[in-house]
Image (cartoon, rainbow, N blue to C red):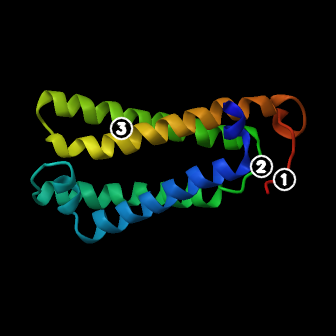
Amino acid sequence: MLGVFQKPLTYKLVHGFTAVLCLYLFTMTLGTPRSFPALVGLSGNEASDFLSRRASMFLLGISVLVFQSRRAIPSTARQAIVLSMATTMGGLAVLGLVEFFRGAATAKIVGPVCIEAFLCLAYGLLWFGGRAFRADGIDGCKASQPS
């Protein structure tokens, strides 16, 4: 099963989806900052607008990072990007559930949590699938060209 997650196409698809999602969220949080809290069932105010606009820059940075690295050859750097994305998405999913059960977020958080959990799983499988490349080559990884 992990063989699928060793294929360059799977890596590109997960990164491409993440890049488009983060770019969409960037434009939403920068252009209409109150729409982001509303997405998870919270009301917006001036403080949330400020935080949404600031968070939009992180979303833009993640979008650029995963878009530019979608053709990276298997390497230690690629594994680090994949592991950090799995950690980020997993953390967001867990935090979303915690806030839901605390009553701070409404049931609208379930959609974003599902997407974050899916991306955490996908990036986690990519990370486990990429561990097979540690055999030899530069950075301790086999140098193979993406297709």
Element under label 1? loop
Q: Position of residue 55 (x, y in %)?
A: 33, 54
Mark 1–mark 2 CB contact (< 8 Å): yes
Q: Amino acid at mark 3?
A: Leu
Amino acid type for the residue under numbered disc 2: Ile
Provide residue 40's location: percent of width, then percent of height.
Answer: 20, 48
**1 or 2: tag closer to the N-terminus:** 2
Residue 98 image label:
none
Mark 1 vs mark 3, CA separation in Å: 32 Å
Q: x, y (%) of residue 129?
A: 69, 33
Q: Residue at x 29, y 33 (%)?
A: 95
Q: Earlier in the sequence, mark 1 or mark 3?
A: 3
Marks 1 and 3: which is nearer the front? 1
Comes first in the chain, label 2 or label 3: 2
The residue pinned by badge 2 equals 73
Q: Is residue 102 left or right of residue 62?
A: left
Residue occupying the point 60% across, 33% down: 125
At label 1, counting other C-alpha atoms closer than 10 Å, the crowd grade (few under 14, some 14-19, many 20 or more) is: few
Residue in front for this viewpoint, 72 or 17: 17
Q: Determine which residue is flagged by label 3.
A: 92
Are the two marked residues, 2 and 3, in contact with CB atoms closer than 8 angstroms?
no
Residue most extreme to the bottom: 31
Residue 145's disc is 1
Image quarter for residue 75? Answer: top right
Quadrant for the N terminus in the image: top right
User: Left or right: where does residue 24 sit relative to residue 101?
Assistant: right
Element type at marker 3?
Answer: helix
Callout 2 environment at 10 Å: few (<14), some (14 to 19), or many (20+)? some
The Cα–Cα distance between marks 1 and 2, rounded to whole angstroms, is: 6 Å
